[in-house]
Image: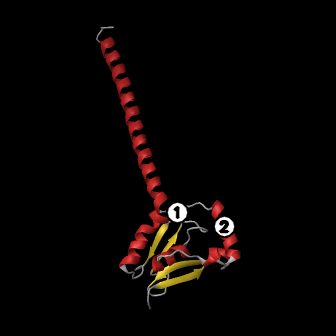
Amino acid sequence: MTTSIYSLPIESTLRIARHYFISSDGTFNNSIGWGANGIEYNGNGAKLTPEQQKRVKEYPEKFGCYNIYSNNCEMFAWYIMTGRRYSGQTQVNSHTQIGASVISLVQPVLTVRGMKYVQLEQAIVRKLNEDLEAAFKSKLEAEQAMRDEFWEKRDAGLI
């Protein structure tokens, strides 16, 4: 088989919508796709030309977050294979176009690009919490040292 675009019906849509992916053997088990978590590699992926590999790497930064209506798996597959984005599901079929448009309004998405910022935010929060905890511990130790000094002076009859 040659590397090409394949699709599977999405059960949760009553098989109306399809998930598109690129595969060299025609199976989802060895494929490259696009979804809410960004680029999805399954098994051995797919055999791509250097130009297609370049398109895979640039896709998240070039087109942004996954969106079922405006940046979906079909658009990804067509772009990787041809250099042009296309989605028959959202550009041709009116019933899937309307459904995808409505779903995209409430769709929670975290893609590779968004994940970078989440990870950065988590690292900052983790560092701030560590610094806050260290400052709190330091304050407690200083207060305890003052109490210890008071009792030592009191016991020595200096107060």
Q: Earlier in the sequence, mark 1 or mark 2?
A: 1
Q: Residue at x 52, y 63 (%)?
A: 65
Q: Position of residue 73 (x, y in %)?
A: 54, 73
Q: Where is residue 98 in the image (x, y as percent from the top left)?
A: 70, 70
State the residue in front, 120 or 60.
60
Which colouring convention does the figure follow?
Answer: secondary structure
Q: Position of residue 78 (x, y in %)?
A: 51, 78
The crowding category of the residue bearing disc 2, from other C-alpha atoms within 10 Å (few below 14, some 14 to 19, many at least 20), is some
Kindly report the distance in space between the C-alpha atoms of the residues bearing marks 1 and 2.
15 Å
Furthest toward the bottom, the residue is 1
Compared to residue 20, the image places residue 140 above or below, namely: above
Compared to residue 125, the image places residue 74 above or below, namely: below
Q: Is residue 125 left or right of residue 9?
A: left
Q: Mark 2 points at which residue?
A: 101
Quadrant where the image shows the C terminus: top left
Residue 9's disc number: none
Q: Is residue 45 left or right of residue 105?
A: left
Question: Which quarter of the figure has residue 67?
Answer: bottom right
State the residue in front, 153 or 87.
87
Q: Mark 1 points at which residue?
A: 65
Secondary structure under tag 1 reads loop
State the residue in front, 38 or 129.
38
Q: Which residue is drawn at 55% across and 68% down?
A: 71
Amino acid type indicated by mark 1: Cys
Q: Is residue 49 left or right of residue 97?
A: left
Q: Marks 2 and 1: in contact by CB < 8 Å?
A: no
Quadrant where the image shows the N terminus: bottom left
Secondary structure under tag 2 reads helix
Q: Where is residue 158 in the image (x, y as percent from the top left)?
A: 30, 8
Amino acid type indicated by mark 2: Ser
The crowding category of the residue bearing disc 1, from other C-alpha atoms within 10 Å (few below 14, some 14 to 19, many at least 20), is many
